[in-house]
Image (tube, rainbow, N blue to C red):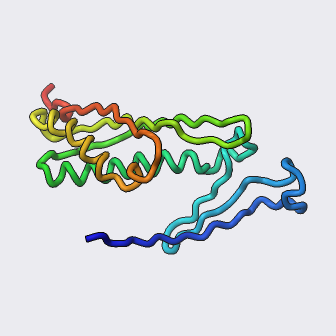
């Protein structure tokens, strides 16, 4: 049975410097995102597109959504599959291309999760579970480019010394 889940946010452009979009250089790309009961996010375009490098841009947030969704799906699969994850981090990358008409699109995102499991005997299963997590990830299922995975799984640091 299919269930629907609804999400809502408000976005407000904060970049009118007095003349609106009268010229390509006349406005800032600043905006804020408000989601009820959550901290606001300040955003801008990527600095390449006249944005503020100190603010989140849509491209970074897309990669963050893919990385965090994969992690949450992966932790779920591990929890029900008997793999005890004690630490998880990811250094994700994305490749976007732009065309001469100003449009663009992502061609891939690569997730590079480093996972530490409670016992070395869990490493093989832990590595296999990335495939299942990818199949379950809502965000990865919503994009039209490949999301690749280069996982590294490690046993816990040895306490012997």
Q: How many marks?
A: 0
Q: Nearer the viewer, residue 94 or 112?
A: 94
Q: Relative to 24, does residue 18 appear above or below in the rendering?
A: below
- In the rendering, at what x and y percent does residue 136 appear? 29, 52
| Left or right of 32, for residue 69 | left
Q: Relative to 156, does residue 32 appear above or below in the rendering?
A: below
Q: Quadrant of residue 89?
A: top left
Q: Relative to 104, does residue 56 appear above or below in the rendering?
A: below
- In the rendering, at what x and y percent does residue 17 appear? 85, 59
Residue located 34% across and 37% down the image: 113
* Quadrant housing the N terminus: bottom left
Query: Farthest residue in the left direction?
Result: 121
Q: Quadrant of residue 22?
A: bottom right
Residue located 78% across and 53% down the image: 28
Q: Nearer the viewer, residue 134 or 56?
A: 134
- In the rendering, at what x and y percent does residue 4 appear? 37, 72
Residue located 28% across and 31% down the image: 152
* Quadrant housing the C terminus: top left
- In the rendering, at what x and y percent does residue 56 appear? 60, 50
| Left or right of 68, for residue 80 | left
| Left or right of 106, for residue 109 | left
């Amino acid at each position: 049975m299919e269930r629907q889940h609804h999400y809502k946010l408000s976005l407000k452009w904060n970049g009118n410097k007095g003349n609106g979009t009268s010229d390509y250089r006349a406005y800032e790309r600043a905006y804020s995102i408000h989601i009820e009961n959550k901290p606001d996010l300040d955003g801008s375009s990527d600095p390449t597109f006249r944005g503020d490098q100190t603010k989140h841009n849509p491209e970074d947030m897309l990669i963050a959504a893919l990385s965090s969704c994969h992690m949450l799906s992966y932790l779920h699969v591990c929890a029900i599959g008997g793999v005890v994850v004690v630490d998880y981090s990811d250094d994700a990358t994305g490749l976007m291309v732009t065309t001469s008409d100003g449009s663009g699109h992502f061609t891939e995102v690569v997730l590079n999760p480093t996972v530490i499991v409670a016992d070395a005997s869990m490493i093989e299963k832990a590595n296999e579970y990335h495939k299942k997590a990818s199949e379950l990830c809502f965000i990865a299922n919503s994009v039209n480019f490949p999301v690749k995975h280069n996982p590294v799984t490690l046993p816990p640091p040895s306490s012997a010394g």
